Amino acid sequence: MTSEHVINLLGGLALFIFGMTFMSDGLKKLAGDYMKTILEKLTEKRIMAVLLGAGLTALIQSSNAMCVMTVGFVNAGMMQLERSVGIIMGAKLGTTITGQLLATNYISKYAPVIAFVGVAFLMFAKSNNIKSFGQVVASLGILFVGLSTMSTAMRPMAQEEWFINIVANLSNPLLGVLVGVIFTVIIQSASASVGVLQIMAVSGVIGFRPAFYVMLGMNIGASIAPILASIGGKKDAKRVAAIVAIFETCGMLIFMLATTFLPVLDWLSMTSGDPSRRIANANTIFNLVSLIVLFPFSNLIAALSKKIIRGSDEEPNMAKLEFISETTHTTSTAMIGQIDAETNRMEELVQTNLRLATENYFDNRLKDEEDFNQTEETIDFLNKKITDALIRMSSFADLTPEQAKHVGNLFHVINDLERIGDHAENMAQYSIRMHKNKERFSKTAMEELRGLVDIIERIYKEAYAQMVSPDQDKYAHVYALKRDVNRMIEDMKEKHIVRMNKGKCNSQQGMMFVELLMDLERVAAHAMNIAQAAN
């Protein structure tokens, strides 16, 4: 084997892995947020969860992405742990379609043409969906060009004595499994790993028996992606990663025992005369049998994950992320779900402080000052952390145009929420000063203030609801309320000047009342910005 063969082998491997990754990204862009919606709504029944896991994974060509997405959904509280088991089992079956595709020889003949057509779509199409389709087609061609290059470069290896000795040792089941685990952990893709194994078989580099055990290890090695995705997440997110490892390990043990007492390898060898197809079939059968055997024990597997990952999450520290996982191993769909959940939490905290700040004026007593300050600190913390997450997400390769727009909108929403929190803090400080000085606004001023506060609280709630679920009628109603607020504030200022001239309130109270009106006006303005974010 010459240096030229080594260079071609590495180049082919690079093209193959790039094609796999690029195709998966393109498919995820085409699927967009539909996967999130489907997974949230249609996984109540376990069998439906399995079918969805298999179908969606076959669509996006990546069980890693599906498992990582599931970790993200569970971490964000969007999916229960027990519902994730079926998704994971289905995902492992769905990913075997990649191996079947790679075993289709006639595609290799036209791979350069397929790549050219895909690139043409990428360069000249105007629609984002057509561009994503072009990305999928181009990457499919690149993937098969890489396979062909690797196949040619590997053939001389079959004659090398040192390599023959290594492959001979892989007939030891445990060693074969270990090599498969290590290889997949390195490249972090079971589909790509099995694809390389198929090429080695076609090139005569490895026989079916050692390839089978290596394939078992490759399936276990795929557990590394969800494990990495769960780092820093909640207990249930870590349990999802444990479920992936449990499923693959149990499947491996079932087949290791079966091959000891039954001629399983002979049966699998009879499925095809093509070495590549034989490995693809073995991989499909392995995951299908594992699914059939282990599916009835779904609840037991979920319970076992709780035994492995013991305890419950710590009492929530307010100045702490509850939904966003700061790991880099996640997908755009899962990350958006986490950011949305954390943003909803921030909105609820801002609403709480806004209510506390205004109630102090009407109850004639200072309420929950310590809680208010702690909540304000948490709002500032979430503003920074969510912004960091949005910046990180902006660089995701699988971000769809719709998701990119949503991310851009959230930058503004987070900023407006934080500013509303600041204005609530200002209003709280005014009330603290008034309580210390034993001052109160006049009865008339308080009545006017109550009416204004009620409308502004409605604007705030309806504006955020409009941002979450855009509706032109809701937006028009918020806009009309905002105009009413502007008129009310101008009218209240004029009446307040009259009261001051009549000596019904002193200058200090007068200044504080005007400052309070200005803060309330800014709250309404920022709420209006939030409503406009979805338009």
Image (tube, rainbow, N blue to C red):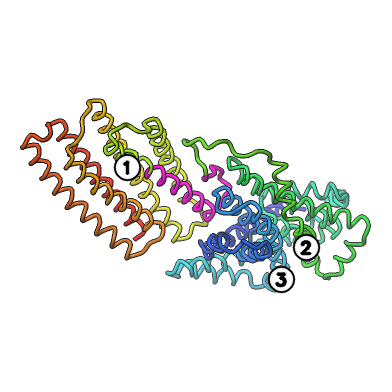
Is 182 positioned to the left or the right of 350 in the image?
Answer: right
Percent position of residue 250, x then y: 79, 52
The answer to whether marks 3 and 1 mark residues whose Cβ atoms lie closer than 8 Å is no
Residue 294 versus residue 344 in the image, above or below: below
Which image quadrant: the C terminus? bottom left
Is 99 positioned to the left or the right of 74 in the image?
Answer: right
Residue position for label 1: 419
Mark 1 secondary-structure assignment:
helix
Percent position of residue 95, x then y: 68, 61
Residue position for label 3: 104
Separation of marks 2 and 1 at Cα, in angstroms:
54 Å
Q: Amino acid at mark 1?
A: Arg
Mark 2 secondary-structure assignment:
helix
Residue position for label 2: 292
Q: Nearer the viewer, residue 124 or 502?
A: 502
What residue span does the magenta drawing correspond to?
323-351
Residue at 35% x, 45% y: name it.
417
What secondary structure prevails in the magenta region? helix
Q: Amino acid at mark 3?
A: Thr
Mark 3 secondary-structure assignment:
loop
Q: Amino acid at mark 2?
A: Ile
Residue 8 falls in image quadrant: bottom right
